[in-house]
Amino acid sequence: MDISVVIPLYNEEESLRELNDWIVRVMQANHFSFEIVYVDDGSSDNSWHVIEELSKAHPQIKAIQFRRNYGKSAALNEGFKQIQGDVVITMDSDLQDSPDEIPELYNMIVEEKLDIVSGWKKKRHDSTLMKNIPSKFYNWSTRKFFGIKLHDMNCGLKAYRNEVVKNIEVYGEMHRYIPVIAKWAGFNRIGEKVVSHQKRKYGVTKFGLDRFIKGYLDLLTINFVSRFAQRPMHFFGAFGTLTFFAGFIIASYLVYTKFFTVSYTGMADRPLFYFGLLAMIVGVQLFLSGFVAEMISRNSPEKSKYHIKETIACKDLGNN
Ligand SMILES: Nc1nc2c(ncn2[C@@H]2O[C@H](COP(=O)(O)OP(=O)(O)O)[C@@H](O)[C@H]2O)c(=O)[nH]1
Ligand SMILES: [Mg+2]
């Protein structure tokens, strides 16, 4: 199969038919063999019903319905497990991304042998104050932080080589950093394509200002997790040991002054005393946290377990 299109959605009943028809039209015009994987993330509107209807007419449709809303990352993660195409396209379901970009994205993966092609909404039709400006800042800082030269990291329209999505795990709100996650997994041929972007036709945006707080916490997590998740002791252990020794040296020095200095005043009056004490306690705590984290990280499959209510034409992966 040439292409799998993965579409996460949350309350987008008005857009789905139009989107589906448009994708099918593009695929047929270019003679691609394809599938479309819809992941309905616990929508409270009619989205799932629309998908069921569509799937009757289109055998290429696969779909997953979550029991509740888990977020875009969860949806992508579960969608990725179902795909079979050589190239995987993700796109938003609100018709802001254009399916006409698919053939070109496909070619960039296949011909230029890229691992990922990320869309770049160079001319963006969203609210300037709420979206465009914050997004510029966010992209700038992510570029500085991770050294990935993308203008629009979080564009919903992206293309991936099959192996990429099969080898990464997206959870929390990490969908914003998929290129970063992929780069860490060793896929570093990352390209960019300017894509057209429309105004939202139906419904409203699902991402408000809270995405910045979550986004930045995730940035820290991802940085931390990618470096230390498999070996928390390297972080906590090193810090803990250093802190403990600093405290120990301070304490030894104080003990030394107590016994060998003539002008001795009283140990507990000295700020250094408390500092040394604190450093030793904190050091031990850090060390122990590292140890506990080390044990936890050995078995934590729970972070990506989502309850699925229904599926259409999907492999049973045994996680309902
Ligand atoms: N699976 C899932 N998809 C979501 C969620 N929130 C938004 N989406 C989808 O993500 C895409 C982009 O969302 P949108 O609200 O348009 O964000 P914006 O384009 O940044 O304003 C759309 O296809 C939404 O349906 C969610 O909680 N779960
Ligand atoms: Mg949108």
Image (tube, grey):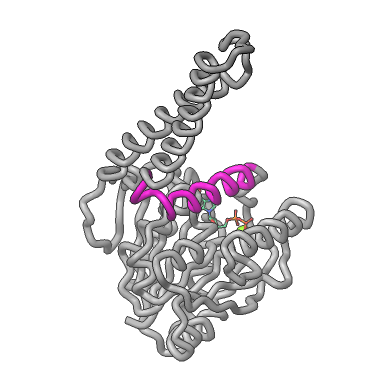
Residue 165: x percent and y percent?
Answer: 38, 67
- Asked whether, in this view, residue 98 is left or right of residue 162, the answer is right
Instruction: Determine whether 55 is above or below 311 in the image.
Output: below
Instruction: Determine whether 291 is above or below 232 in the image.
Output: above
Residue placed most toward the observer, 85 or 113: 113
Q: Which image quarter: residue 53?
A: bottom left
- Residue 29 visible: no
Q: Quadrant of ligand 2?
A: bottom right
Q: Tally the marks.
A: 0
Instruction: Determine whether 223 is above or below 33 in the image.
Output: above
Residue 197: x percent and y percent?
Answer: 66, 70
Residue placed most toward the observer, 156 or 192: 192
Tell me which residue sits at (50%, 53%) in the image: 223
Residue placed most toward the observer, 300 or 105: 300
Tell me which residue sits at (44%, 86%) in the image: 113
Which secondary structure type mostly characterizes the magenta part of the structure? helix
Image quarter where the N terminus lies is: bottom left
Residue placed most toward the observer, 226 or 34: 226
Q: Is residue 243 magenta?
A: no
Residue 75: x percent and y percent?
Answer: 42, 54
- Asked whether, in this view, residue 15 is left or right of residue 85, the answer is right
- Asked whether, in this view, residue 265 is left or right of residue 171, the answer is right
Tell me which residue sits at (50%, 85%) in the image: 108
Q: Which image quarter: residue 18?
A: bottom right
- The region drawn magenta spans 210-232
Residue 212: x percent and y percent?
Answer: 64, 47
Tell me which residue sits at (55%, 78%) in the image: 191
- Residue 244 visible: yes
- Asked whether, in this view, residue 83 is left or right of residue 109, the answer is left
Q: Single out the residue that lies furthest toward the right.
A: 129
